[in-house]
Amino acid sequence: MNEQKIVEIDTVKIKKRLKQRKAKMKMSLSVCARCTLCADSCFLFNNNNKDPKYMPSYKFINSIGRIYKRRGKVDRAALEKIREIVWKDCVLCTRCYCPFGIDIPDMIAFARSICREQGVYPTFED
Amino acid sequence: MEILNLITSDLLYDLARGPLVWISFLILILGTIYRTVKLFSFTRKKKNAWPVSLPKKKAPDGDTDKSAPLIPKWKFTVFGAHPVMISVSTVFHVILFIAPIFLLAHNIMLDEAVGFSLCSFPEKVTDYMTIVFLVCGLFFLLRRIFIARVRAISSVYDYIIWCITVAPFLTGFLSYYQVFDYKTMIILHMLSGELMLAAAPFTKIFHMVFFFFGRFVLVTQHTIGKGSRTW
């Protein structure tokens, strides 16, 4: 019942979606100073031996950042990796703090919506 | 060959101290205006946003645990979490702005060029400032190389931006003390400074503007004040 429907990745649609939110996404990615001051505001980071993969900036750069860098030309394997980041490593509690005011949760939510649109999302068995 | 080298270095020197200065300032000013206007055009005035601060109502005495130790408010801020990083960062950014603006040599040149100059710090003060700046820069570099969490999100681009930011200060210091060949060093100083100015609006250095926009103008959970715009 929970089996995921395998659909072809529609890169044109991803590109279109990126275009809709381009301004905020591009600005957020370009001004991130990679300072890592957001790290300690994430409870998952603090409760996983401070593993860098749980840092809000790491999740945002490696999810929507990766999709944007490739201008939407991502394959299923890449989206599946992003799925792990945006669903397993982040619960969208929206508590992350960025000294510059980058809206990291919104960026992660955007990456989720792109993945979901392409049929890549977590199932109950995961 | 030597004559050719002399001509090239003279040409580069004249170029760096002349048109390139104005071009880089023009790029900095117009680029910053362009990107700031874009920031405003991407956002809109907030309407019916929920209150970002809670009403200031004192809790009744019975609700507070008097035996609990009082933790100062600042301990819960980013300064409380990273006091060293925030202190170093603040010093680094303040010097980055004030040292070149109030440097005696820069002001003398400004006076010669336009007949107007700002006040200047004594040279010893700007010297110490530069040393402190370089130490702060080294701190950032070592942090980027050796701390796992910073290394995890660092790319070649971050190191390039670090070089662009630190190079004008390092070359300026070396040229002032005439370490290595003075002319080469002063040309490098001017070129690196111009590169930093021109790069500022179009690279991550633009966080100099976005910081104020993101923290004071945009309405988010961490807005300082009320904020007035949303994406």
Image (cartoon, rainbow, N blue to C red):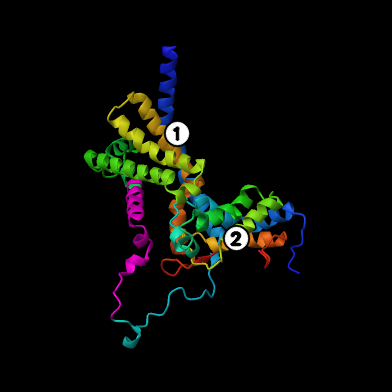
Above or below residue B172? Residue B184 is above
Q: Which chain is mark 1 on?
A: B
Under tag 1, what secondary structure? helix
Q: Residue at x 54, y 73 (%)?
A: B47
Q: Amino acid at mark 1?
A: Leu
Report the span colored magenta: B67-96
Alpha carbon separation for disc pair 1 and 2: 45 Å
Under tag 2, what secondary structure? helix
- Residue linked to disc 1: B20
Q: Quadrant of residue B63?
A: bottom left
Q: Residue at x 46, y 57 (%)?
A: A50
- Report the quarter where the C terminus of chain A lies: bottom right
Q: Residue at x 73, y 56 (%)?
A: A13
Asked whether the residues under marks 1 and 2 belong to the same chain, the reply is: no
- Report the quarter where the N terminus of chain A lies: bottom right
Q: Identify which residue, B70 or B38, lies in the foreground.
A: B70
